[in-house]
């Protein structure tokens, strides 16, 4: 257990501390931000490390083993259509709980005008990821080629962009990029590999890769389509 | 954003938000378990509840830290940086922040290690990590240029993804999947909280609309590794190219 705790700590502190160090150097040499904000940044670094650490430990203790168990055993217990439905719902609720998505929708809410509040945005992103994940499982069952999915998906997005408000393009692309975080990625990978093992007889390694990419495509597509009507 | 709010209110607000965030996931997993996996010990369900309480607490503390410290500081720094310093300095700062954030990102390392193993060491872990990090560094720097000169996001993202799709046509399907995954793992919590607030601060510092000009940096961070990985795939003709056949 203590080894896992240490791992989780390094995993969290790893990306935060080097950036904090760069910030200290910048503060001293390049830009002087008022001291009270710099102090708040210091407090923020501590809170972010402690918070993410507890989040990771909690998620790994309780949620991810269960998610992985479901991901690897459900495909052999239920018919394919039900699997697609469960994956859709799981993708949705996992995204709603993802820290990155929370922060992103917060920030977007604070700068963008109009009806797209942070809670609505979280729900839309969740729906997009759920749909994409269900589509990815369907792809594994049907054996469609990965390049075709990315090609068609991004082609639709690019074709729609000229008709969408520029603000929405930024929101859509940013959302797609953040959906994949410390909570969704392990769940997605577990489900993908579980399905690959039971449903397809192909090379499961090749099928496991690419799921995260498809998951990012979902929210981009859904938000671009929402943007058409906004 | 929530600067005016007293700490107590912010804490209460954030706590209830964490509950709302994690509640549905736990409920769905519990329901799936009860319906399909009756044979599994109750202990896992207990662990799940304990884990959820710890995770909710952690999420609350994390969000507090982001709101109290990261966002206000990064926005102020972005605004000052872009108005007080010359373009080359701003570009270098963007590059360094992007590079540092990605080199240490565990998700990137995990992916790189998987690839290292999958290709039996032909593609080294360090090569992958560097490829992804360089992509991110260039994209954060490019975004600073975009904000400074007011270039619309679409002018970069449009050609960028077209170029990526063009490269896909010449790439092995394993590498395609890998490249798009690399785009997903590059955007960790640091990219979203710090880099994004920096860009929004820079946009408002330049007197531009932070919604259209400030947003979009995460999108660039996700796109750049796709292109850099696909380019790497053209340089390294993987050994699995001959052995595996397309389905």
Image (cartoon, rainbow, N blue to C red):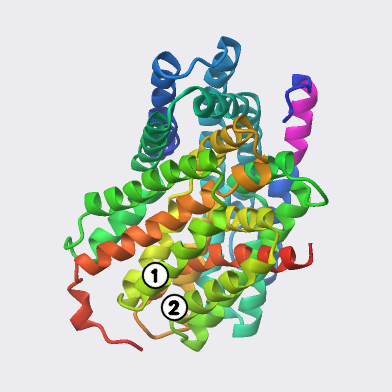
Q: Say above or below: A193 vs B244.
A: above
Extent of the magenta region = B8-17
Q: Is residue B64 magenta?
A: no
Q: SS class of the residue under badge 2?
A: helix
Query: From where the camera sits, is residue B211 visible?
Result: yes
Question: Do callouts 2 and 1 point to residues on the same chain?
Answer: no
Q: Quadrant of residue B166?
A: bottom left
Circle 1: element type: helix
As drawn, is A219 to the left or to the right of A124? left
Image location of residue B137, percent across then percent down: 37, 43
Give the letter of the chain under mark 1. Answer: B
Looking at the image, which residue is at 36% across and 65% down? B178
Residue closest to the eye, B122 or B29:
B122
Q: Are marks 2 and 1 in contact (CB under 8 Å)?
A: yes
Q: Which residue is mark 2?
A: A146
- The residue at the point 66 percent across, 56 percent down is A166
Asked if residue A210 lies left or right of residue B172, the reply is right
Asked whether residue B37 is in view, the answer is: no
């Amino acid at each position: 257990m203590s080894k896992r705790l240490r791992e989780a700590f390094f995993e969290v502190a790893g990306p935060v501390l080097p950036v904090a160090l760069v910030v200290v150097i910048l503060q001293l040499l390049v830009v002087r931000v008022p001291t009270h904000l710099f102090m708040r940044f210091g407090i923020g670094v501590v809170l972010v490390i402690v918070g993410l650490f507890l989040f990771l430990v909690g998620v790994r203790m309780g949620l991810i083993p269960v998610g992985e168990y479901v991901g690897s055993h459900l495909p052999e217990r239920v018919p394919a259509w039900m699997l697609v439905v469960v994956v859709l719902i799981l993708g949705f609720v996992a995204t709603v709980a993802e820290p990155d998505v929370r922060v992103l929708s917060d920030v977007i809410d604070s700068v963008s005008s109009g009806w797209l509040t942070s809670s609505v945005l979280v729900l839309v992103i969740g729906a997009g990821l759920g749909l994409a994940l269900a589509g990815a499982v369907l792809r594994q069952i049907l054996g469609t080629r990965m390049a075709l999915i990315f090609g068609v998906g991004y082609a639709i997005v690019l074709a729609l962009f000229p008709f969408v408000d520029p603000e929405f393009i930024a929101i859509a692309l940013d959302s797609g990029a953040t959906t994949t975080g410390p909570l969704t990625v392990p769940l997605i990978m577990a489900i993908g590999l579980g399905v690959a093992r039971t449903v397809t007889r192909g090379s499961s390694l090749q099928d496991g890769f690419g799921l995260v990419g498809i998951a990012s495509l979902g929210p981009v597509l859904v938000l671009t389509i929402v943007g058409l009507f906004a | 954003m929530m600067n005016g709010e007293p700490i107590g209110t912010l804490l209460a607000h954030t706590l209830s938000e964490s509950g709302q965030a994690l509640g549905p996931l736990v409920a769905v997993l519990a329901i799936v378990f009860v319906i399909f996996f009756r044979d599994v010990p109750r202990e896992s369900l207990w662990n799940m509840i304990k884990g959820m309480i710890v995770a909710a607490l952690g999420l609350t503390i994390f969000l507090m830290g982001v709101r109290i410290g990261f966002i206000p500081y990064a926005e102020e720094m972005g605004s000052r940086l872009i108005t007080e310093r010359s373009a080359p300095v701003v570009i270098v700062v963007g590059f360094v922040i992007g590079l540092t954030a990605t080199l240490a990102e565990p998700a990137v390392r995990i992916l790189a290690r998987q690839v290292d193993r999958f290709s039996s060491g032909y593609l080294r872990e360090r090569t992958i990590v560097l490829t992804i990090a360089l992509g991110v560094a260039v994209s954060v720097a490019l975004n600073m240029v975009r904000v400074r000169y007011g270039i619309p996001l679409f002018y970069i993202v449009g050609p960028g993804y077209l170029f990526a799709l063009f490269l896909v046509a010449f790439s092995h399907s394993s590498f395609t999947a890998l490249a798009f995954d690399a785009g997903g793992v590059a955007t960790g919590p640091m990219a979203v909280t710090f880099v994004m607030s920096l860009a929004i601060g820079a946009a408002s510092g330049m007197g531009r609309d932070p919604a259209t000009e400030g947003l979009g940096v995460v999108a660039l961070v996700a796109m750049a590794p796709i292109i850099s990985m696909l380019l790497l795939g053209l340089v390294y003709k993987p050994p699995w190219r001959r052995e595996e056949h397309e389905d």
